Image (tube, rainbow, N blue to C red):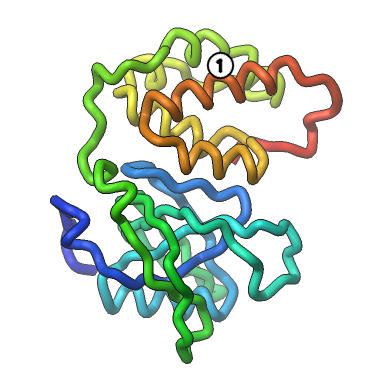
Amino acid sequence: MPGPVTYKTVGNLPRAIPLFPLSGALLLPRVHLPLNIFEPRYLAMVDDALAGNRLIGMVQPRTSEFDDQNPEIFQVGCAGRLTQFSETQDGRYAIVLTGICRFRVIAELDTETPYRQATISWADYMDDIVPAADDAAIDRESILGSLDAYFAKFGKQPDRAPLDSAPSESLVNSLASICPFGVEEKQALLEAGGLPARADLLAGLIQMAIAEDGNTDARTLQ
């Protein structure tokens, strides 16, 4: 594969990208999202991405029906660059996307590819290209202080050391991606106006999850 690419402005990004609808998969700028690809249409999508600019647009379906081949999607997603790739003996692809920038779907394209493509706009999310300053006004203590109780609810014991030392953007975006929130909550985190807004929403969702009663066995950390 070609070497690393750094996008300095959204002007360096294409106006049309392939779409990969996947419920519960939240990609954010500079977050790594591992994916296991096995459907023929998405194997073709990865092949084409590898031969081109290596960009794939992650979007969430509005429905959780797995047999819906063309689900209605949320209009805001995040583009990821294919940064790791391997092929298994049974023909699956194990890939990693690294988040680049959020986008808004303008119109889906009428194409002959087995996967969906769309023209998109980056205009609302131009600041995604540049990492947020680590002194961004986020309440790290509120987030970190509730993590132990939150993860314990799901029977997990995360290694807190890298979380404590992580830059603010990495902390917020990575936790937003891995925490087992529902589709609507994940979409709200994706569409949050900036890092402080996402951090506040994340802290609130963690507190709500801790306070929830009922069985959480069906929800697992990604």
Q: Residue at x 38, y 21 (%)?
A: 162
Residue reaching furthest right? Answer: 214
Q: In the figure, residue 2 lies in which quadrant?
A: bottom left
The residue type indicated by label 1 comes to: Leu
Q: Residue at x 58, y 20 (%)?
A: 204
Tell which of 165 and 135 is nearer to you.
Answer: 135
Query: SS of the residue at dot 1?
Result: helix
**Residue 37: x percent and y percent?**
53, 67
Q: Is residue 103 placed above or below 106 in the rendered structure?
A: above
Q: In the figure, residue 194 lies in which quadrant?
A: top left
Q: Residue at x 24, y 17 (%)?
A: 135
115 sits left or right of 119 in the view: right
Q: Residue at x 42, y 34 (%)?
A: 173
Q: Is residue 86 placed above or below 208 in the rendered structure?
A: below
Q: Is residue 113 placed above or below 16 in the rendered structure?
A: below
Q: Which residue is mark 1?
A: 147
**Residue 110: x percent and y percent?**
48, 86
101 sits left or right of 114 in the view: left
The total of numbered circles placed on residues is: 1
Please tell me how crowded label 1 is: few (under 14), some (14-19), or many (20+) other residues with Cα within 10 Å.
Answer: many
Tell which of 162 and 115 is nearer to you.
Answer: 115
Tell which of 204 and 168 is nearer to you.
Answer: 204
Q: Quadrant of the N terminus?
A: bottom left
**Residue 186: x percent and y percent?**
57, 41
1 sits left or right of 140 in the view: left
Q: In the figure, residue 66 lies in which quadrant?
A: bottom right
Q: Quadrant of the C terminus?
A: top right
